[in-house]
Amino acid sequence: MLLTGRLEDGRSFAAIRTSPGPAVFVRRDLAGEAGAALGLDCFEDWSDMGGHALARFRLEPGGLRLAERALRSAGIAEEGLDRGRAEDELASLGIRGPVVLRGEEKRGRRVDAVFVEPEIEASAGFAGSLRWLALDIETDRSGSVVAVSLAEGGKPGEVLFVPLGGHSSTVPGVEAFPDEASLLGALAARLARRDPDVITGWNVIDFDLMVIIERCKALGISFDAGRTEEPASFSQGSRPSGKAVLDLPGRAAIDAMRLARGSGARYDDLSLETVAREVLGEGKTVSSRDEEKIDELDRLRLEDPGAFCAYCLRDSELVLRILAETGLAELTMRRAALTGVALDLAWTSIPAFERVYGAALRARHVAVPPKTERRVSGAAGGTVLEASAGLFPKVLVFDFRSLYPSIMRTFNVDPLAYERAAARAPRNEPAQIASMDGQSAAISSPQNPIIASGDDIAAPNGARFDREEGVMPGLIAEYSAEREKALERGDAVAAYVYKILQNSFYGVLGAEGCRYARTEIAGAITSFGKKFLVMARDFFEERGQRVLYGDTDSVFVLSGEEGGFARLSEAGAAAAEALNAEIARRVREEYGLESYVRIRCDKVYERLVIPRLKAAAGEGGRGRSKGYAGLLLAPDGSSSVEIKGMEAARSDFTPLARDFQVALIGLVFSGAGESALRDFCRSEEAALRRGERDGKLVYRKTLRRLAQDYESETPQVRAARIMGWGARRGRVSYVMTKAGPEPALARGASLLDYDHYVEKQLFPIALSIADALGYDARAWMAGSAQIELDFGE
């Protein structure tokens, strides 16, 4: 087992320990026979997830196949295996992140210090710090690598490149090479000398490093840039994604683009240029794309090698600055240290959950179950209460804090508790699971029953859980306590990591790729969620307050109060306290449990508008789910417009539509009457037709497949094909002209189609607002009188 990393004093290290031996499990009552077959007289008492007693026999390294053969010859079935992986050994030692090493230190060749067979234990104090190096390559039209840039915090950047025209480099930090082979050989040596813990870059795994390794193979070069002499390589299918996985011994490779995608931040597209401009306010030195970019870089490489190398180095520097500005590098290290997974798996949900859950099972001497082929349908989405359309004053939003984790903690919704309850169930009758509409269906079988006897906890969907505390409640309690400590000491990074880990637990329990997932478990969580959302609605209505909308873990309530933020938030806090007391009483009386479910008054709106879902006679009518806008009040007395799920918050609408909707809603919240709203809409339409809004008319949509693979020619597909995209996918920017959609940067002589933008962008927004207020939007825009009304979702 090889461990590498960074010591507290900044030196790199490697620790070499004998890999743990595997183990085999058999039924406890067959321990004697199994021991005789294996030639072993010692075993440990364990159990399976259902509570059945097992005997665990430790084997010598490499002895698993012989043991399996011996048990098979004796007619004894295996009940589980531990394959002796390094990650299992670390889990058994309680190690997730930083460690304490005790042992003799020796000088290393590719690291500063080497420890052989050291004592190792988890470190509680040292937070750890790793060195990140960003790498970027440039290739020519033949695919050969012609430049590589390296950037590292606190150190000068450098560029290795193959010049055109025989130029030699006189630029500091730039080194020229006669050919690609010598450049790549120098790159491997340079990485070994710089000795980073993490190599990153934009699409660095699927492009830069893959190209480097493929070119080294083609040139007969060993790319040994790791901390051993074993060359870097790619393996296929060893991770849940099925993607090729880079093996760079002793170092981690992290794709910064994947971190940005998984961070939750929204960008127009995930190009380095776009993300850098949104995060840093600046971009690359050459921002053109496709053929234009290649032509420009060829020119620079020939005529201005210094500018060419500066372009290459800036790409690496931008990546490091993005990671620092967003905190994603630190978040990645914190999350990996909390769960114990490798850095490149830090942002995955299933591997992280399985690592943490498996370690908790081992601590209880419970065998980790093997992965099996099992259909997991997930569970119904969160419950949505019907929305009321209209404009409403003084609205309070009540939010259940971490609803799903608190449900799991309160009701012991946990795979181990589920299996323990199921193990006591009759084996000859199917279980009945109540569906979300109140009907029931037999969705399990005699081989997978969920009916249990005894004093189990029964979820509203029919799933049952043992009352002895499972793993999940303890994990959630631990993470909740650590998050509160992090908030108290002002550690926002740690608080965020604990929060997102807790919130991921529900999703993995309904995901088919997780060994612990069950449809019944995920359904139990959402069924409890529905119970509490309906309970909250009934609570407010019994108090004479109108519930305007509810979704999963929040309810919108017409307060009936007057005053500003202080008065409204005070009323909301009092109502939340009363509701929490009612929830605690109900949980105690119905289940005999302590409730960890808590609701709070989360937001105060001076005014809230909910658009109508479809045309309906009379006042009110059914409102649009997940779409509303409010004038949000702040404690200091200020206010701001907040829009959720409407056009201004959707990436498939143009900047014209988003700006128009924000301004129109702002007028509504300022108390403007119909005439002012009509005048604004007509002035915006007139400005559009005069060409004053031409800079806001670009659609940006993503092709998930290659442009040539689409059968129907949607506007974005047509624009992509005009640009020559065939075997290419990605973000397409286009405008609508009288001749149809055209690429934004390659528009012909056709005039812009202003009628399209009025009909498809401005009028739908005006219509949704006008209808919520009881007005006729066709009078608001000169070009809309003949447009057919459409109250879509």
Image: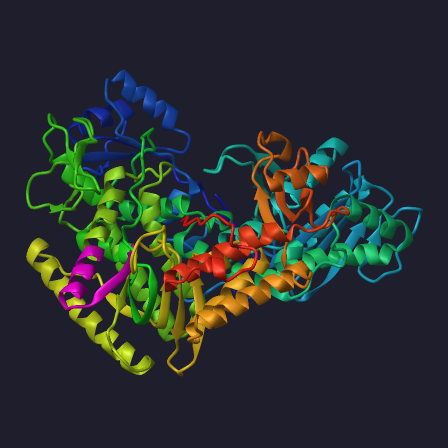
Whether 149 is drawn above or below 425: the answer is: below
* Left or right of 404, for residue 499: right
Q: How many marks?
A: 0
Q: Position of residue 687 (x, y in %)?
A: 64, 64
- Image side of residue 643 versus residue 536, left or right: right
**Residue 76 magenta-drawn?**
no
Q: Which of 416 and 579 lies nearest the eye of the viewer?
A: 579
The colouring scheme, among rainbow, by chain, secondary structure or one colour, is rainbow
Q: Is residue 534 magenta?
A: yes
- Tell me where residue 482 sits by quadrant: bottom left
Q: Position of residue 237 (x, y in %)?
A: 51, 33
- Picture residue at 44% right of the left edge, 76% below the top: 670
Q: Is residue 651 above or below residue 673?
A: above
Q: As rendered, which of 163 and 648 lies closer to the eye? A: 648
Q: Residue furthest right?
A: 166
Where residue 438 sits, quadrant-wise, is top left
Q: Residue at x 82, y 54 (%)?
A: 308
In the image, residue 481 sits, relative to residue 627, either above or below, namely below
Q: Quadrant of residue 54?
A: top left
What is the x, y in percent for residue 353? Answer: 36, 47
Judged left or right of residue 449, residue 57 is right
In percent of width and height, residue 338 lies at: 40, 56
The answer to whether residue 553 is seen in the rendering is no
User: Which range is magenta?
Assistant: 533-552
Q: Is residue 20 left or right of residue 175?
A: left
Residue 519 in view (yes/no): yes
Name above or below for residue 31 compared with residue 473.
above
